[in-house]
Each structure stands twice: as structure tokens, then as C-alpha cells.
Image (cartoon, rainbow, N blue to C red):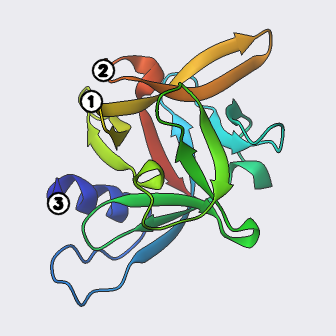
Amino acid sequence: MAAVLASMVMAVGGAVAVAGPAQADTVLRVEIVNDGTNRCMVSTGIANYIRQGSCGTTAARWNMTVRDDGSIIFSKQSEGLCVHAVWGSLDVLLLACNATDGRQVWTWEGGAPGSQVLANETPWGPSCLRLSPYSVGDVRIRLADCANSLSEYFHARPV
């Protein structure tokens, strides 16, 4: 896991510090891009759902906080909101940040070669972010059982 994290952090232009309790978190400004569509994870303000949308916009920019244990929190720092898995449903929302809430803690996990999935450790086991067509023109990013599919492959791109 540490090697995967180190290569991912280096890919977005950051220095990596993986071991040791005295190390500070690393915060990177990124877009989270789906490998299958080349579109970004966005916050639209519509019911706080996380959706797929255009890259290169303010809505597509995230603070990716890589904590010293390798876990990640995605936030809109100016709004004090974080990407939040709603356990017991499929929803992924933008809600008030709480660094001790496991529903806001993500990890990069292996996928197909060159791709990774973003997983959240739910009480029922890991769930992954996945594109989920919701209605015409609206693709939400939701929770699903990790299935190693193209709709789950994401990467962080520096902004």
C-alpha cells in the first residue's frame, strides 16, 4: 500500500512521507478523473451529490489530504465539506468535514494495471466509488461493491 501511495503522490507532484507518527499530512490540489470517460468527479451543489462532470472547473478541484497512515480525505476546503460515503445506501455526498468519521476516509486500492479504485471501508467490507447513470445526462458517483471495472478506475491529476 505504501508503494502505491508513494507513486500516486509523486504522480501529482508532491513529496511523499509515508512512515512515522510525527509526519504531517500532505495536501495536494487535484482533479479526480475517471479512466474510462476522462471526466472528473465534481460537486455541483445539487443536493450535495457527487457527480461526473467537466474537468478544468472549480467544481472539479479537490484538496486531497494524504494522511500519515496512507488514507485520504477529499475536501472542498473553502466550504468545509468532504466527500462522504453514506453507509447503508449507494450515495456519496458532500457533507461537513469530520476527520474522525470513517465515512470520509478513502484509500487508493489496486485495480487493473495502471488503474486504481477509491475504496471506503464500510462495516460490511470495502466499497468503491463507481460511475452510476442516474438519469439522462446525469452520472452520479456512488458506492458499489468493488468489482474491478472500468467505471471504478480513477486517478488524481494535479491542478
Return the residue at label 2.
148
Q: Position of residue 51 (x, y in %)?
A: 68, 32
Residue depicted at x 36% and y 17% = 149
Q: Residues within 10 Å of mark 3 (few under 14, many from 20)?
A: few
- Quarter residue 109 falls in: top left
Q: Quadrant of the C terminus?
A: bottom right
As measured in the structure, the alpha-carbon distance from the residue carrying label 1 to the one carrying label 2 is 6 Å
Q: Secondary structure at mark 2?
A: loop
Mark 1 or 2, nearer chain start: 1
Return the residue at label 3.
2
Q: Amino acid at mark 3?
A: Ala
Q: Secondary structure at mark 1?
A: loop
Report the side of 91 relative to 108 (left or right): right
Q: Do the CB atoms of the residues marked 1 and 2 lie less than 8 Å apart? A: yes
Q: Position of residue 23 (x, y in %)?
A: 27, 86
Q: Amino acid at mark 2?
A: Asn
Determine if residue 1 is in view. Answer: yes
As measured in the structure, the alpha-carbon distance from the residue carrying label 3 to the one carrying label 2 is 20 Å
